[in-house]
Image (cartoon, grey):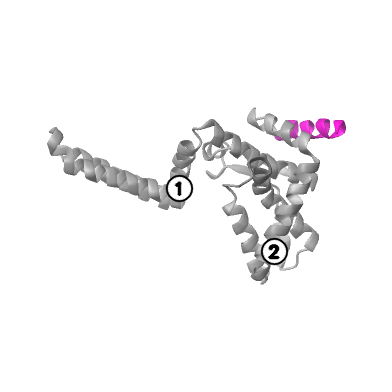
Amino acid sequence: MRETSLNIIAIGIFVLTMFSLLGPMFNVSPVIPAIATFSILVLATIDVLGWQGQGGTIIVDLVEGTSSERRERIVRHEAGHFLVAYLLEIPISGYALSAWEAFRQGQSAQGGVRFEDEKLAAQLNKGMISEELLNKYFTVWMAGMAAEDFVYGNSQGGAEDRTKITAVLTQLKRPGQSKIKQSWASAQARTLLENNHSAYEALVKAMTERASVSDCYQVIQNTGSEE
């Protein structure tokens, strides 16, 4: 379960505990908050052990995604991944803009753009991966943060994308290159986004409307031909 999920549960338990202490002042039986607290702990345990924290992820995403600004930032982040993957010819199998959407699609409760990365996985398993393929994926993974920085001047998401790069380089016994590669890939992604700004904006609109992957491809192609 993500740290945010644990924090929400901790806050919920704290509030319920305080309610049990203050309940007598309002003639509320202490049994009610006690049962509620126990239920939260049971559900949290089931979520972590049975669902690998997916339930908590869905709840957090629903809470965090309530503002229009937050929703737009998410779309722009994921559109960055999508467009750069398209430009670098990395196949996209689907996308979800929230944990709940991903769950409804039969995926693990983790929103984002999904890539067909069998080739990357196969080369990593052999311990022999081309630098070209590695750089392509690094650029795609950093593209979400690059898109946010391009539009807003800062990035709020992307911790998991950075972790992917670190994990891959650690597996290749090159962990010291992580920060350098992140910086390089981010610059590459930003350049691609700047050079294809119209396509990016059109893609943001299409993804906001939940267009299919093939329709998103078409939007990029149509806009690209106009630039």
| Residue 207 appears in the rendering | yes
Q: Main secondary structure of the magenta part?
A: helix
Q: Secondary structure at mark 2?
A: helix
Q: From the viewer's side, name the closer residue of 174 and 94.
A: 174
Task: Say the numbered circle drawn on residue 180.
Answer: 2
Residue depicted at 58% across the width and 53% down the height: 160
Say which residue label 1 marks. Answer: 51
Magenta-tinted stretch: 213-227
The 10 Å Cα crowd at callout 2, few under 14, some 14 to 19, many 20 or more, is few
The residue under label 2 is which amino acid type? Ile
Q: Quadrant of residue 193?
A: top right
Q: Position of residue 6 (x, y in %)?
A: 40, 50
Residue depicted at 69% across the width and 47% down the height: 115
Q: Residue furthest bottom?
A: 173
Whether residue 172 is situated above or below residue 17 in the rendered picture: below
Q: Position of residue 132 (x, y in %)?
A: 80, 59
Q: Position of residue 184 (x, y in %)?
A: 73, 58
